[in-house]
Image (cartoon, rainbow, N blue to C red):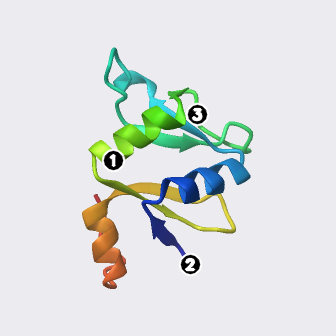
Amino acid sequence: MAETTTDHATIRKWAESKGGRPAAVERTHKGGDVGIIRIMFPDAPNSEHDALTEISWDEFFDEFEDRGLALLYEKDSMFSKIVGRDTAEKRAQGDSKAHR
């Protein structure tokens, strides 16, 4: 069952426990703009991180807050999806098809 959080410590602990690192989509990461953020898992089989560039956790969380995002994740797997907080709220109210 997927959980949703906006807590920075929870996100970082979960990601690092799975070998995850903060990243930005390379083509959107220009100058002072972090761009689209992701959590990459470079050591995972079939990981598609060639289009990602590693960033600092500070950059990641600054963008995370600026865009009003939340992390949808599963504690026992590497599944994660960054969603808008409005989507997270809709999911919390039972709308499992909500997405942004």
Q: Distance between the residues labelled 1 and 2?
A: 25 Å
Q: According to the image, label 3 marks what residue?
A: 49
Q: Which amino acid does label 2 sit on?
A: Met
Q: Distance between the residues labelled 1 and 3?
A: 23 Å
Name the outermost residue toward the top: 31
For residue 92, side relative to residue 19 (left or right): left
x, y percent for residue 67: 28, 46
For residue 77, side relative to residue 61 (left or right): right
Element type at marker 1? helix
The residue located at (53%, 57%) in the rendering is 80
| Contact? badges 1 and 2 (CB < 8 Å) | no
Q: Which amino acid does label 1 sit on?
A: Glu
Which of the two discs, 2 and 3, sits closer to the camera?
Answer: 2
Element type at marker 2? loop
Q: Is residue 70 above or below residue 57?
A: below
Q: According to the image, label 1 marks what residue?
A: 65
- Residue 1's label in the rendered image is 2
**Mark 1 or 3, nearer chain start:** 3
The residue located at (58%, 60%) in the rendering is 79
Q: Which amino acid does label 3 sit on?
A: His
Which of the two discs, 1 and 3, sits closer to the camera?
Answer: 1
